[in-house]
Amino acid sequence: VMRQGIVHRLDKDTSGLIVAATNDEAHRRLAVPLQRRIMHREYLAVACGHSPNRQFTVTGPIGRDRRNRLKMSVVTDGKPASTSFTVVEQFSRHCLLKCQLASGRTHQIRVHLAHIGLPVYGDPLYGNRLVGREFGGQALHAARLSFAHPGDGRLLTFTAPLPGCFRQLLDRLRHP
C-alpha cells in the first residue's frame, strides 16, 4: 500500500469533517475528485465585520506570503482560488457565513476572508490576535462533505454538527 490515510484534511484548530482512505485504491479514487474540485466541501465561519452582499465570491490566486513564510496570501503569481460565501446570519459586529470551495488551497477560506477585510473570528494568523483568544482557534467548521463512494460510485454526504464552543459563540453573538 503506497498511500493510506488522510485525503481531505483541515487546518489546525478548524473543526469538522475529514476524509481518510483505508487503502491505496480508495485513496486514489478519493483524491482524484478532490483534485478535480468535484468533491463538494461546505464550511461555516464566523467573520469579523459585515458583508454588504448576501452572496459573494472571492477569486484571487493564493501563494506564500512574501513577508511571513507561515502565511499564505492573495498574490499575482499564486495558484488560482475561488470561494463562494453566503451570509447565513448577521450580528452586531460579526456574521455567520456558509463557505463553498471551488478550489482547495492552503488556508483558502481564511486568506480570502482576510483579503476582503472580514477575517475569521479567533484566527491568530490572519486576524486580530486579540479577538477571540478565548475561543482557542478560528471559528471555522467543515460542516458538509459530498463525494462518490470509491467502490460503487454512489453519492455520499456527511455532515458534522457544530462543536459546543462554536454554538456558545453563536449564542453570545445573538444575545450580547
Image (cartoon, rainbow, N blue to C red):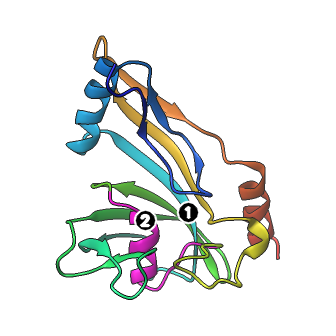
Q: Position of residue 64 (x, y in %)?
A: 32, 74
- Residues 151 and 3: in front is 3
Q: Position of residue 169 (x, y in %)?
A: 75, 64
- Name the residue rendered at 34%, 55% in the picture: 101
Query: Viewer-proximal residue, 68 or 155?
Result: 68
Q: Residue at x 35, y 42 (%)?
A: 40
Q: CA distance from mark 2 to mark 1?
A: 9 Å
Q: Are marks 2 and 1 in contact (CB under 8 Å)?
A: yes
Name the image quarter holding the N terminus. top left
Please identify, in this view, whether the residue under mark 2 or under mark 1 is nearer the observer.
Answer: 2
Considering the numbered disc 1 on the image, is that residue within a helix, a strand or a loop?
A: strand
Work out which quarter of the rendered image holds the C terminus and state it: bottom right
Q: Position of residue 9 (x, y in %)?
A: 46, 45
* Amino acid type indicated by mark 1: Ala
Residue type (three-letter) at the residue carrying disc 2: Ile
| Residue most extreme to the front | 2
Q: Which mark is residue 45?
A: 1
Q: Is residue 114 magenta?
A: yes
- Residue marked by disc 2: 109
Label 1 Cα crowd, 10 Å radius (few <14 / some 14-19 / many 20+): many
**The magenta segment:** 105-121
Give the structural element (helix, strand or loop) at label 2: helix
